[in-house]
Image: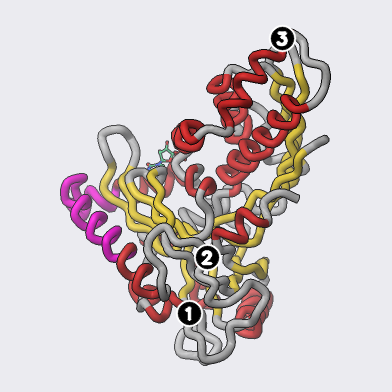
Amino acid sequence: MPTRVRSHAKINLGLAIGAPRRDGFHALTTVYQTLELHDVVTVTARRAGTRAIRLTSSDARVPLDRKNTAYKMVELVLDELGVAADVLVDIDKRLPVQGGMGAGSANAVAALVGLEVELAALSSTGNKGPRDQGTEAGTRELGTSRWQARRLEVAAQVGSDVPLFLIGGTVLGVDRGQEVYPLPDLEAMWCVVALPEVGVSTPQAFRDWDALCASDGLTEEGSAGKLNELSRAYASAFAEAIPGGGVGAGSSGVLSAGKDLAGPQESALVRAGISSWIQNDFERVVFSQHPSLAEIKRLLAASGKPEAALCAMLSGSGSALFGLYRTKGDAEAAQARLQSASVASALTKTLPRREYWGQMLL
Ligand code: C5P
């Protein structure tokens, strides 16, 4: 039986980047937030004498070889568990490819979750021959706490923004983005994602950032203090904003998903004042390359108006931008503004941790 898994998108509620490091990466401090918006990844695993991994996708732009993060994940997990199986991964693409929404990284985690379910089913059914002993031993490993820690390391090997999808909800990301900590969950909020036609290359955006650091004289050591301070500010702001929410708490339960956010309840983002100080450093380099994206941010924000966004900014290195809103009506008004400027958009909601895991398997 194939296993179908929702592969949710993320946005960055602020992204501060340090100067380039000697290892080619950049230290950063960010808050990731998962969204309801998702691709669907279907995993099928069969017993086999030798390992075989095949990928299919509804979108021709998705690579079907080792370049695909889902491929890398399956390969690493089978290696790690010492399991030989014939694995088929289908990616039904609904999210933008290279949009700054972590779609490829989420696909990798969905493939991992689907593979775990498939391997568990394989070991509990069918005629088992001598060649299945490896599968049995590997599958027993899946239930252990050692595997829970190991899969985070495997995810970090696949990509910097893969591990966040093993936590879900509101997540603090530091180091190169792979070191993740669950934050007290923000309540579900209406979110509009603008999907501009221009593409932004993440490596190019980092190179442009490097040029800016060089001209500003920002060094690795100089930026470390700023990033650490910001991590502390995020952790304490989120803990204070969410009643009873220590770091590591699950869904806040302030509002259940599906309810409108109109009413006396202010968003935790506003309560903490976070919406006034978060920013995405990539905007400094990406907006100068693509001025149309700065205009889309302005349309999403509607600053000074009653229907203004709680915050609006670029997600990751873009090109997707998002706005968060108090009510569905405010979000729909933002979509109408984008539509009159011929910018495609999607209406969604932020997805707290409990719902993220509760809705993952289809
Ligand atoms: O980790 P991931 O494969 O997603 O990174 C892709 C590229 O993005 C890296 O090779 C690096 O050039 C850049 N990157 C970076 N700093 C980060 C994350 C990614 O410079 N924190």
Q: Earlier in the sequence, mark 3 or mark 2?
A: 3
Q: Earlier in the sequence, mark 3 or mark 1?
A: 3
Q: Quadrant of residue 124?
A: top right
- Which circle, 2 or 1, is nearer the viewer? 2
Q: Is mark 3 within 8 Å of ligand 1?
A: no
Q: Quadrant of the N terminus?
A: top right
Q: Label 3 is placed on what type of residue?
A: Arg
Residue, disc 3: 131
Q: Which percent across, then down, holds residue 344?
A: 67, 66
* In front of the other: 16 or 354: 354
Which region shows up in magenta? 211-234
* In front of the other: 233 or 195: 233
In the figure, is residue 317 to the left or right of 339? left
Q: Label 2 is placed on what type of residue?
A: Ser
In the figure, is residue 301 to the left or right of 17? right
Q: Label 1 is placed on what type of residue?
A: Ser
Q: Residue at horizontal 29%, vertical 48%?
A: 211
Q: CA distance from mark 3 to mark 1?
A: 55 Å
Q: Earlier in the sequence, mark 2 or mark 1?
A: 2
* In front of the other: 200 or 332: 332
Q: Which percent across, then down, holds residue 180?
A: 41, 48
Q: Which percent across, then down, holds residue 36?
A: 64, 61
Q: Which mark is residue 267?
A: 1
Q: Residue at horizontal 21%, vertical 52%?
A: 223
Please tell me whether residue 222 belongs to the stretch shown in magenta.
Answer: yes
